[in-house]
Image (cartoon, rainbow, N blue to C red):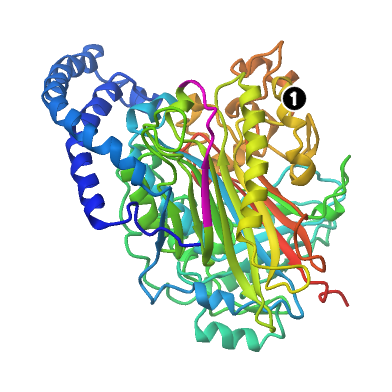
Amino acid sequence: MVLYTSPFPNSFLSVLHSFSWGLIFPCYWLADRLVGSFVPTTYEKRQRADDPCYFHALCIIITTPIYLALLVASLPFALIGFLLWSPLQSARRPYIYSRLEDKNHANGATLLTEWKAAGTGKSFCFGSANVCLLPDSLARFNNVFNTQARAKEIGRRIRNGASRPQIKIYIDSPTNTSISAASFSSLVSPQGGDNTNRTVNAGIKRTTSMEYKGDNSGSNNSEDREDKGGSGEPNEGEENTCIVRINGEDNGHMSDSEADTVNGQAHASGPAEPSLEGDAEISKTPNHKQKEGDSGSLDSYSASRESLVKVRVGDGTVDQSTVNNKLLYKASIMKKTSVRKKKHTDETFDHEISAFFPANLDFLCLQEVFDKRAAEKLKEQLHHYFEYIVYDVGVYSCHGCCSFKFVNSGLLFASRYPVMDAAYHCYPNGRGMDSLASKGALFLKVQVGSTPQDQRIVGYISCTHLQAIAGDTTVRCEQLDMLQDWLSEFRKSTSSSSTANPEELVAFDVLCGDLNFDNCSSEDKLEQQHSLFTHYKDPCRIGPGEDKPWAIGTLLDPEGLYDEEVCTPDNLQKVLESEEGRKGYLVYPTSKNHSSSQKGRKASLKGNGRRIDYMLYTEEGLYLEWKVEVEEFSFITQLAGLTDHLPVAMRLMVSTGEDDP
């Protein structure tokens, strides 16, 4: 299958399309600004609290006639542009495939040589997020604004989190079953006088691990490979790791000498490398204004150093010349689920609430990237880490769908591994406002390795965004039916293997996206019982109507996005760790007797918030001798203040069957 690198088959149509959009854009921009001036966000209201009450009204009275006059003047040009633009959409391709042209940072081909499926398994990390990049006037209805600046900052935060070295602290505790994860600074921090001697549960052993994928591009240099050779035989494709063990003897106290040792090792780090291009810029968007040391901001001191420091360890002994102090203070604690005493203890994977996107993120699926200019800015930032990106997915005008489409599907896919095939389908049954967007599903086939016999190792990833309007249960169920049919069709059309002579080995099949229903609402029972969940597994789900105790909602209450308690990744992480915090800042499942907007009544509702963003995987259709297991599941707060959804991430381990002793 040919991947489309441009929206039109020839340059003439591309130029004509650019000309027509140039005629439309002034009218579009003025209308967007005009409507946006009447829809202030809570942040703007707070900023204006000290201004005279008449000041904002005076500004609107002055600017509205100006916008209206310019809008009327631009309408004739917009009409001419529309008459050119609309018929061109019949020739438009359903997506644009972008590959990083800078060969110094391109490493997709190198990644394919890391895993030969001989001797060891391989883990792959998937992320999904609804980023709410609509035209600014529409985004304001979700209490977010400044779409262009948000797009750039979202991309910077994602690549910063994915390319950083990551420290995780695993706790084996038979008594503490709370949801992870407190900042490591609460355990070992130089900023508090008593923090280095904080009491912990007796018998707890903490293990921190750090992975590093190289500066943004995710590639390893020769020095890293030499270091790995001196520390034993790591798993094939596994990156450098740093392990720090803190034993919980002496009634769970960490002694002064132990604390000094940890701090001494951290302070022994060498000088930091230069920060990434653009990292030192101070964000001018109020949505993502960060304080110094905020772990979610690329501008923070700790974040920029985290993305550059390289470390390795042998047998729990830290190389003191390379460990960075800041890394130890910005880690997140994860419970080791195998020893937790919970009602449901069948899962064997780790789960956490993290202030960062996972290190070594391999695949990223985004929803609601509707604004085309914002998509370009986001793509530019993501290309610092992801080599392959599929964006501007969808159809426009009346082409390919039943109703007129003003915006695309909003789907975007980014990958560190080469994309082999891609396909898009539009849901024809959208209703209401959703019918104006070409919501649908994007299907991708990626190559992740090859066997010694030159068989390709591939994976399938699907990204979708379902009908959003509450009560449209029937519409969503129909879309899920179509999704399953399209999935099966894509697998068949892109498979080049036969059972007798397999040319390809399928390592994984993952489905993710914003499904716009949760597993606990009584109004979503039909979706919860859909046959999709018999073929695909949800790591957060026990069964229809019941989530696992550690699973939390992914839909934030828009009214609280800019509260000081949750406006930074660290703060939001801490709030979501507590049940009371979740009740205050998450939207909860609805029922016939309760409203999700009535915070005082949330205590009687099921679950830990509305979880409408999903990461699903299946074991069907994979190579029979391999086994796929979830290694880790994360709810991510790194986009705090930039969107009204929590991103989710899942790490899968593909075991070849040769790992076992």
Tell me where residue 528 appears, x and y as whole percent: 74, 31
Depicted 613 relative to depicted 364: above or below = above
Tell me where residue 167 appears, x and y as whole percent: 62, 63
Residue at x 57% of width, y 85% of height: 225
User: Residue 354 versus residue 455: which sits nearer the camera?
Assistant: 455
Asked whether residue 315 is in view, the answer is: yes
User: Residue 527 versus residue 652: which sits nearer the camera?
Assistant: 527
Asked whether residue 193 is in view, the answer is: no
Q: Is residue 136 left or right of residue 227?
A: left
- The range drawn in magenta is 422-432
Depicted 222 relative to depicted 187: above or below = below
The residue identified by callout 1 is 525
User: Residue 642 versus residue 183: which sits nearer the camera?
Assistant: 642
Q: Is 430 a magenta residue?
A: yes
Depicted 48 relative to depicted 496: above or below = above
User: Residue 78 versus residue 286: which sits nearer the camera?
Assistant: 78
Q: Quadrant of residue 385?
A: bottom left
Amino acid beneath label 1 = Lys
Q: Is residue 195 left or right of residue 223?
A: right
Query: Helix, strand or loop at disc 1?
Result: helix
Residue at x 43% of width, y 27% of height: 403
